[in-house]
Image: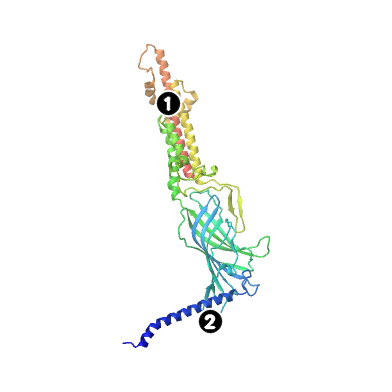
Amino acid sequence: MFRPNEVVGIYLLPLVLLLISTVKGEDANNYEMMLQEKLLTNYSTTVRPVRNHSHPVNVELQLTIQSVLDLDEEAQMLTLLAWVNFKWVDEYLRWNEADYGRIDATRLKADQIWRPDIHLYNNMDKSFDFIDTLPIIYSDGRIIHKSPIVLKSDCAVDMSNFPFDTQICRLQIGSWTFDGNQVNLTNQGIKLNLDSENSEFKVINFSSTRFMKIYVCCPEPYLEIEYTLELKRRTDHATHFIMSPCIICSLLIPFIFLLPHGTNNKIIYGKIMNWSCDFRLIRAIAGIGQLIANVLVFGEFEAIVPHAYPRVPTKGLKSYSGPDQYKVTNTVKFSFLGILFMVNLVLTGLALVFTVATISVWKRSQKKKPVPGFMRTAFLGICGRVCFVHRDDFLLDVEADSQSPLDESNGSTERDVERAGKLTAAAEWCQLAVILDRMFFVLFSVLVIITAIAQ
C-alpha cells in the first residue's frame, strides 16, 4: 500500500512537469519577442544593410521553374510559375544566441527588413510582386527569402516552323535602382522542377548568364541575370488533327482527273476536296476552335482541337539582338503549316478550274464539230500515245449515244460519210478531254510531291 504522501506525489509529478514545460515555452516566446524588438529598433528598410557604405551587398539569386503556364503567341508573352530564392547578409540583424535562449533563427515580415529591389526587366504584367512569405534571419545576419511568383515576360515568337517550332524565351532580372557597386547580384543558376507538364510545350534546355551593363544614362555598371528557356512544341495534336488530314487532302487532289466524264462526280469531288481543306467546315462540324485572324500567315484556318493551332502575332515579331535590347520588326514570316494550307487551297482551286475546262472539252463532243488542227497536232498525236488514249476507244460510246448510228443505212453514202465525220469529231473531243485529264493528273501529282518534299 502507498502512503498518503506518496500518492499525492504520484499525482503532482505530471502537473509539475507540465508547469515546467509551459514556463520554458513562455520563456522561449519571450526571448523571440525580445529578439525581434531588439532587431527592429532603429532599423531602416531603405538603408543598405552594410556597416561600411562603400561595400556592396552580396545578393545570391537562384530561380526554380515550377511550371510553364502558357506561351501566348499572339501577345508574345511567356507565363511561368517559379520560386525565387534570395540570400544575402544583413549586418544590422545579428545577435548573440546565448543572450536569447539559444535562438539561432527567427522570421520577420518581408516588409520589415531591407530587401533588394529585384525586378523582371522584360515584364509584361502591370505588377511584379512576390507572394508574401516570411524571410528567415539567422544569428550571423544571413537571410534566406524563398518566394513563389508568377513571371510574365515577353518572348520573341517565331512561327515559321509551326508546328515543329522551337521558341527561345529570355527573362532579364536585376536591381532596379542599385548599381553593381551597391548590390552585387550573383548567379546561382536555374533549376527545373516541374510540378506539371505543359500540354503544348516542353522545356528542352535552360541556362542562366550574368551580365554587367553600362547604360547611356548612368556611368555605373548594372548587373543583370538572364535566364534562357528553350521550349519545343508538342506536335501530337497538330500532327494527328491538322497535318495528317492536310497531307491526305493534298494526296487526293490529283484523283479528281481520273473520275469519268458524263456525270457531275468531278465537280462534287472537287467541292468536297475544297471544303475539306477549309477548316471552317470542320469547325462547324466539331464546334471547337478559334478563328485565325492573320490570313497571310495561317490562311484563315481554325483549330480543331485545343492548343493544336496557335494564335497569330498581330503587332509584328520581336527579334532578340543580344542582352542589351529587344527590338520590334514589322516583318511577318510565313509558317510551315500556313504555306501547306495555302498550297492545298491553290491546288484544289486550280484542279476545279482545269476540271471545268476538261468537262467543257467533253461537252463539245455533242456539237460534232471537228477538233482544231493545232490541238489535234499538239494533243491527239504524241500525247495520246504517251497517255495510252486512242480515238477508237470512244467511237462505240459516241455511236451508241448518237441518234443515227452508222449501221443504219439511209440509202445515201454521202450522209454516211457525213455521219462518220461527226462521230469521229465527237470521239476526238472525248479523246482530247481524257488526254487533258491524264496530263493534269500527272502534273498535279508532281506538284503535290514537290510541295511535300519542299516542306
Closest to the observer, 415 or 48: 48
Query: Hey, what amino acid is under mark 2?
Result: Ala
Q: Within 10 angstroms of label 1, few (less than 14), some, or many (20 or more) residues?
A: many
The image quadrant that residue 260 belongs to is top left
Viewport quadrant of the N terminus: bottom left
* Residue 177 can be seen in this image: yes
Q: Are marks 2 and 1 in contact (CB under 8 Å)?
A: no
Secondary structure found at label 2: helix
Q: Position of residue 415 (x, y in %)?
A: 41, 14
Alpha-carbon neighbours of circle 2 within 10 Å: few (<14), some, or many (≥20)? few
The residue indicated by pointer 1 is: 430
**Side (left or right) of 344 relative to 412:** right
Point out residue 174 in the picture as x, y percentages from the top left corner: 59, 63
Q: Secondary structure at mark 1?
A: helix
Taking the view exactly as shown, the residue that stands out farthest to the top is 411
Q: Quadrant of residue 2?
A: bottom left
Measured from the top left, where is residue 37 in percent x and y? 57, 75
Nearest the eye: 301 or 439 = 301
Residue 335's label in the rendered image is: none
Give the mark, 2 or 1, whose residue is nearer the N terminus. 2
Q: Position of residue 184 (x, y in %)?
A: 60, 68
The amino acid pointed to by label 1 is: Cys
Q: Left or right: where does residue 389 sit relative to residue 226?
A: left
43 is higher (above) or lower (below) than 330: below
Q: Is residue 139 visible?
A: no
Q: Image height check: is 267 above or below 115?
A: above
Q: CA distance from mark 2 to mark 1?
A: 109 Å
**Residue identifier under label 2:** 98
> Disc 2 vs disc 1: which is toward the camera?
2
Which residue in the rendered view is the most extreme toward the left? 1
For the residue pair 452 and 226, the one nearer the viewer reads as 226
